[in-house]
């Protein structure tokens, strides 16, 4: 009797997944949001019946997804199904932070596999194709600027942008990791209210203002920064590993800086809008972003929070 119930529930969740995927693929606007609903059936099935049964559901979803479009759908089913299964495994253990970390890793692995799959089976490189489109856009912009003012030095105007664009292939691993983290966070935000309605016990995450990363991150950041000062062949694997590690560590330090801003605003009783405005302003003004990173380093290295008195 129980086995029949497990199979029936699996069939219902599988049908829901396929319906969500259809809307995600073909419905404009709402489709983007529904992408992050796709892991939910796998989370629920993993929580209720374990990761072994959920893995069977993932195989069924991957096979059936081909019937609703191109073969590429199997990559979508695998990416969101595997990530949902992983996050559900940790939700079942009542470990919300572990679910976020595990989900980030699962998404990153899935994205890498999907990227390789697209190159191998479809002979398409999304990153190189995107760079090609950007180059064409730059050339068109140069032509337009030259037509308006022939005396303008267009090469100088676009030099910084073109140099940054050359780093895109090198920073592909950072792009994959950051995308995986973002996808895991969005999946978590969507999943939590649904799982709570289903009476799934979830341990709450610490408020963002209370996040404190390991101090060792600062030392890793310092060592990598020094190593990058040494001249390297930019096409070497060593340089690629260093530059990606540098940006990932920089991102963590930035998160710590933002966490301190939220902590300070909370302790001082400031409006909730103030830290949000500061985050947006720092993303628009490079100097502020630099100051936030310094703040993150100070917050990690010194007991700064203990010296702030509550208003």
Image: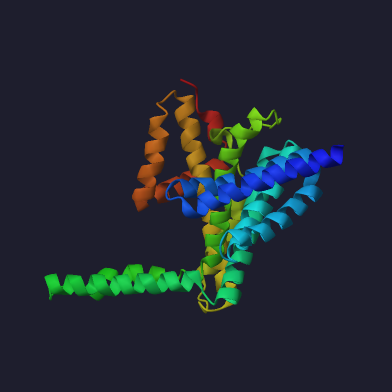
For residue 19, above or below residue 138: above
**On-image quarter of the N terminus:** top right
Query: Relative to the observer, which residue lies in front, 48 or 115?
Result: 48
Write the residue at 48% across / 34% down.
Answer: 262
Question: For this view, does 158 lie left or right of residue 228?
Answer: left
Label tally: 0
In the rendered image, residue 183, in percent from the top left (x then y), is placed at 56, 50
Write the residue at 73% across / 51% down.
Answer: 57
The residue at the far top in this view is 311
Question: For this view, does 54 lie left or right of residue 174?
Answer: right
In the rendered image, residue 78, in percent from the top left (x then y), is placed at 65, 58
Question: For this view, does 307 lie left or right of residue 108?
Answer: left
In the rendered image, residue 279, in percent from the top left (x then y), is placed at 41, 42
Write the residue at 59% across / 32% down.
Answer: 193
Q: Is residue 82 visible?
A: yes
Q: Is residue 100 visible?
A: no
Query: Relative to the observer, which residue lies in front, 248 or 218?
Result: 248
Query: Relative to the observer, which residue lies in front, 282 or 171?
Result: 171
Colouring convention used in this rendered image of the protein: rainbow
In the rendered image, residue 98, in percent from the top left (x then y), is placed at 69, 44
Write the residue at 65% across / 60% down.
Answer: 109
């Amino acid at each position: 009797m129980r086995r029949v119930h497990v199979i029936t529930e699996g069939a219902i969740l599988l049908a829901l997944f396929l319906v969500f995927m259809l809307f995600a693929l073909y419905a404009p606007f709402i489709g983007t949001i529904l992408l992050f609903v796709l892991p939910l059936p796998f989370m629920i099935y993993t929580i209720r019946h374990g990761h072994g049964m959920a893995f069977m559901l993932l195989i069924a979803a991957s096979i059936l997804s081909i019937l609703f479009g191109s073969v590429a759908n199997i990559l979508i089913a695998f990416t969101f199904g595997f990530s949902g299964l992983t996050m559900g495994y940790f939700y079942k253990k009542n470990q919300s932070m572990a679910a976020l970390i595990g989900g980030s890793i699962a998404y990153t692995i899935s994205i890498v596999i999907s990227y390789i799959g697209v190159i191998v089976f479809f002979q398409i490189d999304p990153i190189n194709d995107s760079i090609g489109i950007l180059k064409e856009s730059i050339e068109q912009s140069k032509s337009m600027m030259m037509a308006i003012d022939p005396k303008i030095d267009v090469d100088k105007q676009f030099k910084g942008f073109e140099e940054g664009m050359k780093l895109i292939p090198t920073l592909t691993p950072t792009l994959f990791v950051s995308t995986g983290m973002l996808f895991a966070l969005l999946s978590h935000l969507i999943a939590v209210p649904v799982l709570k309605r289903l009476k799934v016990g979830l341990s709450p995450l610490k408020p963002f203002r209370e996040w404190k990363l390991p101090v060792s991150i600062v030392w890793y950041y310092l060592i990598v920064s020094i190593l990058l000062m040494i001249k390297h062949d930019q096409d070497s694997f060593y340089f690629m590993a260093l530059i990606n590690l540098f940006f990932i560590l920089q991102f963590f330090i930035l998160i710590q800086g933002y966490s301190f801003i939220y902590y300070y605003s909370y302790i001082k009783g400031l409006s909730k809008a103030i830290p949000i405005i500061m985050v947006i302003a720092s993303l628009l003004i490079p100097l502020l972003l630099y100051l936030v990173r310094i703040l993150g380093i100070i917050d990690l290295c010194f007991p700064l929070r203990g010296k702030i008195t509550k208003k």
